[in-house]
Image (cartoon, rainbow, N blue to C red):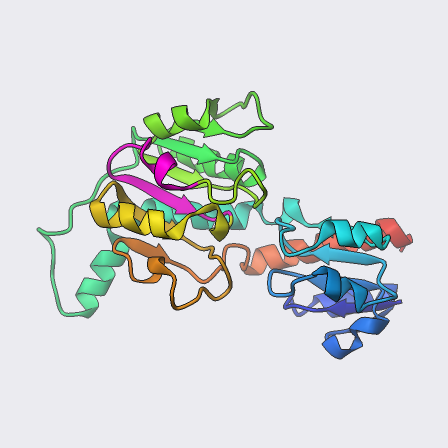
Amino acid sequence: MKILLSDSFDASLPDRLRKFGDVTDDKAQLAEAEVVLIRSATKATAEYIASAPKMKMIIRGGVGLDNVDVPAAEARGVRVFNTAAASSIAVAELAFAFLLAIPSRIIDGHVSMKEGKFLKKELKRTELYGKTLGIVGVGRIGTEVAKRAAAFGMKCVGFDPVVAKHDIVEMTTLDGLCAKADLISFNTPLNDSTKGMVSASLIEKMKNGVVLVNTGRGKIVVEADLAAALESGKVGAYGTDVWESDPPPESSPLLKAKNVYMCPHIGASTKENLLRIGDVIVEILGREYGK
C-alpha cells in the first residue's frame, strides 16, 4: 500500500506509518496512492480524486472537511476521515489567546513600544471577568473555549443547532446570543447554514463594541460587512486565524480594516497537536488495516 503525505505533518509520522506500507511525500505519486493524508493546503476536489484511481482513503489532519469533496469521494468508494478530537485544545487555546490579547491591548502595546511610543495613558484595558462570552458552535473546540472562559469568571452562552443542553454553556438562539454577548467566539464548520452568517443583519443584533474571534472558517464572514462594522465601531475588534483562502487575497477588506488582529491559519499547528494528529491517523489505519 502506498501512503501519500500531501501536506506537512509531524516529522515522526512517516516512520510511524511504514508498517502500513510505502510512505512518500512526492505529490507526483498521487495516481499510485491508496491512502492520502492532507491538511488544509490540499484541495481534494472531484478532479483531484479522479486523478487517483487507486485511492481508497483520505484522512484530513484537522477538523473541517470543506476542502474535501465528500460526495465525489463517496461516489468513488473512497472513505473520508478527519482527526477532529486531536485539534480541540490547540484551536481553543488560540481562540482564548485572542480573547485575552484584544481586551488587554497586548498587541497594541507591543507595536507601539516597538515604534518608540509609551502609551500608558492612551491604552485602556478591559477585563474578561464578569463578561458574557457567546460561543457559536459548541462542539469539542467550543467546549474547550468555554472551560477556559469559566476559569476567568465569564458567563458563557452558546448557539449550536445540534446541541440542546450543555454542562457549562447556557444554550440559546443565535439572536439571543448576539443580544447578550460582550465577546463572541466562532467555532463553526463551513456549510450551507454557516456560510456568510456573520453579515450586516447579524452584526446589527450584536452589542455595540462587541469583540469577535473566529477560529472556525473564514467564509462564515461577509468581509465587506464586517469591515464596515469595524470602521463604524459597531464591532470593536476582530481576531481571526481563518480566511476565505490561504493566504487571503490582497483585495480582502479585512487586511486593512482597523482593529483587526490576524494570524495565518495556525490554530492547529502546535507541536503537541501535530503529534496527536499522528496518533489518530495511526489509530485509523490500524483499525482499518489491522496493524
Compared across the picture, whether 217 is left or right of 155 comes to: right
The front one of 32 and 192 is: 192
Residue occupying the point 22% across, 44% down: 233
Residue 123 position within the rendered picture, expressed as x and y whole percent measured from the top left? 15, 51
Residue occupying the point 73% across, 75% down: 27
For residue 223, above or below residue 9? above
Does the magenta-highlighted stretch encompass residue 203? yes
Residue 289 picture quarter = bottom right
Residue 282 picture quarter = bottom right
Residue occupying the point 53% across, 33% down: 138
Q: Quadrant of the N terminus?
A: bottom right
The answer to whether residue 191 is visible is: yes
Q: Which residues are magenta?
A: 198-216
Compared across the picture, whether 241 is left or right of 18 comes to: left
Residue 140 picture quarter = top right
Q: Quadrant of the C terminus?
A: bottom right
